[in-house]
Amino acid sequence: MGYPPCSCSAFSLTTLKLEPPAELLAQIFPWIEGEQAALDTCQRANRFAMDIALRQFLRLLIWLRLVLMQDAAVLFMQHPSCPIFQFPPFNSSAFRDYAATSTTRIAEVEEQARLAFANLPEHMVISLRGAVANMSLDQKRERDKSKAQWNYMQEQMLHMRGIVEQLASSKSSRRKGNSGT
């Protein structure tokens, strides 16, 4: 019995310990560290100058540049002629080396996963497939339930809108009636 090959999306390059080189990451949003230092300085100078949203936003940008670099590495190996790969940092030899290493490591891990699945006893494979099927059904039920709630809320909003429009028109007609007498 054959199993479908794993897709690259099944693995995170961070989980595979394939962090992009620091010099590549520093080229995406290169101003983040400076902004973090400025925020730290401001907060040390005034303890009431806490900007949690800015701090979290800068942390998000650091994570996004990691994700961008990792996804770009995978995409580069699939579509090397894509125009974005003609611009820095994606046109550098450091990026191309990282992309090649990442893709090779992903292929190795996928092969290990395929072999592990192939060596599982049949009853475990059936159990895993059953678990995946159950999760899929549970997710579908949740989506259906959410959709029903969404439809109900839309109906309620339309009903409320009708009431508000009716109230607004009755007030305006009373005002017209009062101003005419």
Image (cartoon, helix red, strand yellow):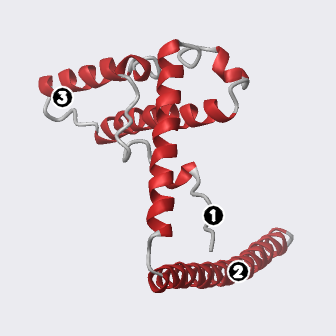
Q: Quadrant of residue 65?
A: top left
Q: Secondary structure at mark 1?
A: loop
Question: Which numbered disc covers residue 160?
Answer: none
Q: State the count of labels.
A: 3
Q: Secondary structure at mark 3?
A: helix
Tag 2–tag 1 contact (CB < 8 Å):
no
Q: Is residue 103 left or right of residue 156?
A: left
The C terminus sits in image quarter: bottom right
Where does residue 75 sit, x and y in percent of width and height? 62, 35
| Residue carrying label 1 | 4
Q: Nearer the viewer, mark 1 or mark 3?
A: 1
Question: Which numbered disc covers residue 151?
Answer: 2
Amino acid on which the number 3 mark rests in the picture: Gln
Q: Residues within 10 Å of mark 2 (few under 14, many from 20)?
A: few
Q: CA distance from mark 2 to mark 1?
A: 37 Å
For residue 168, say whether it is visible: yes
Viewer-side residue, 84 vs 175: 84
Q: Secondary structure at mark 2?
A: helix
Where does residue 4 sit, x and y in percent of width and height? 63, 64
Q: Is residue 86 above or below residue 32?
A: above
- Counting residues from the start of the chain, the first of labels 2 and 1 encountered is 1
- Counting residues from the start of the chain, the first of labels 3 and 2 encountered is 3
Q: Residue at x 62, y 74 (%)?
A: 1
Q: Residue at x 47, y 26 (%)?
A: 98
Q: Residue at x 67, y 22 (%)?
A: 84
